[in-house]
Amino acid sequence: GEDVEQSLFLSVREGDSSVINCTYTDSSSTYLYWYKQEPGAGLQLLTYIFSNMDMKQDQRLTVLLNKKDKHLSLRIADTQTGDSAIYFCAEKTRPSNYQLIWGAGTKLIIKP
Amino acid sequence: DAEITQSPRHKITETGRQVTLACHQTWNHNNMFWYRQDLGHGLRLIHYSYGVHDTNKGEVSDGYSVSRSNTEDLPLTLESAASSQTSVYFCASSEGNEQYFGPGTRLTVT
């Protein structure tokens, strides 16, 4: 069945780059998403990439997609304390129509 | 600005009681979703709707129901609350490729 996997935690130093990884199993994915959840808040859409692209950049965020390996990553340049959050990867597959398949989330911890 | 709101933000209830969580969106989106979020499970889909009078079961729908009488609202009802339903509940709406979330309702069943 469809599955999305993420590491549960990532710890980085302030100012370094953070790279959050995600793998998925469904080769029919159309769009892949990154959401951010700050403590006590809902999920905020950060960015998403169409499956025929391999890279998307938006200010400090870079999304890389390796469709062959079914691997998605989110790179945050110059990580700041405000980037502390849980980051969710999600995929949209054709059979599921508007539904998203979610990873369990990666908690990004920033060390001073 | 268009938004999606949930109420209440926090709720404590007793086992066996009926509880309804409200979700209201002003995006005029056709698609609406209810998720629960539990540690180690990420988001799990409870119910979803693709339009007025349309409702569908998600992967964890047992013990929950929804109804869609207008575009803006998708209330979630727990028919007889159980301790296993203690969770944070999120409502979301979408049109096209972007899904937007409400702030969540933290429900505790004692």
Image (cartoon, rainbow, N blue to C red):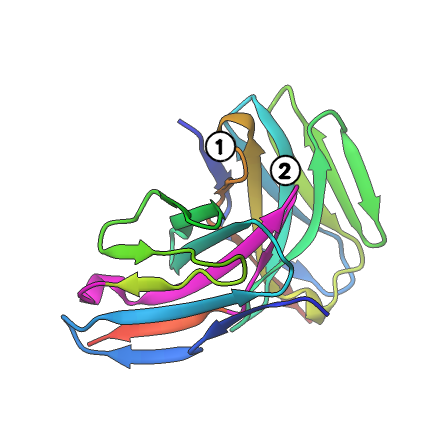
**B48 sits to left or right of B60:** right
Span shown in magenta:
B79-103
Disc 2 to disc 1, C-alpha distance: 13 Å
Q: Vertical placement of A73 versus B75: above or below?
A: above
Question: As rendered, which of A68 and A45 lies closer to the eye?
Answer: A45
Residue B82: within the magenta? Answer: yes
Counting from the top left corner in percent of width and height, residue A17 is at 75, 53
User: Which chain contains the residue that carries disc 1?
Assistant: A
How would you rate the neighbour count of disc 1 (Cα within 10 Å): few for under 14, some for 14-19, many for 20 or more?
few
Point out residue A49 in the picture as x, y percentages from the top left corner.
72, 37
Q: Nearer the viewer, residue A92 or A46?
A: A92
Looking at the picture, how far across and down is residue B99, in whole percent?
Answer: 60, 51
* Residue drawn at the location 75% of the way across and 61% of the way down: A79
Quadrant, the C terminus of chain A: bottom right
Q: Amino acid at mark 1?
A: Ser
Q: Residue at x 50, y 40 (%)?
A: A99
Residue sitting nearer the eye, B56 or B16: B56
Say left or right for A87 vs B69: right
> Depth check: B57 or A12 in front?
B57
Q: Residue placed at 32% from the left, 70% from the top? A: B20
The residue tagged 1 is: A96
Q: Which amino acid lies under the numbered mark 2 shown in the image of this protein?
A: Leu
Mark 2 or mark 1: whose residue is earlier in sequence:
2
Residue A32's label in the rendered image is: 2
- The numbered disc on residue B44 is none
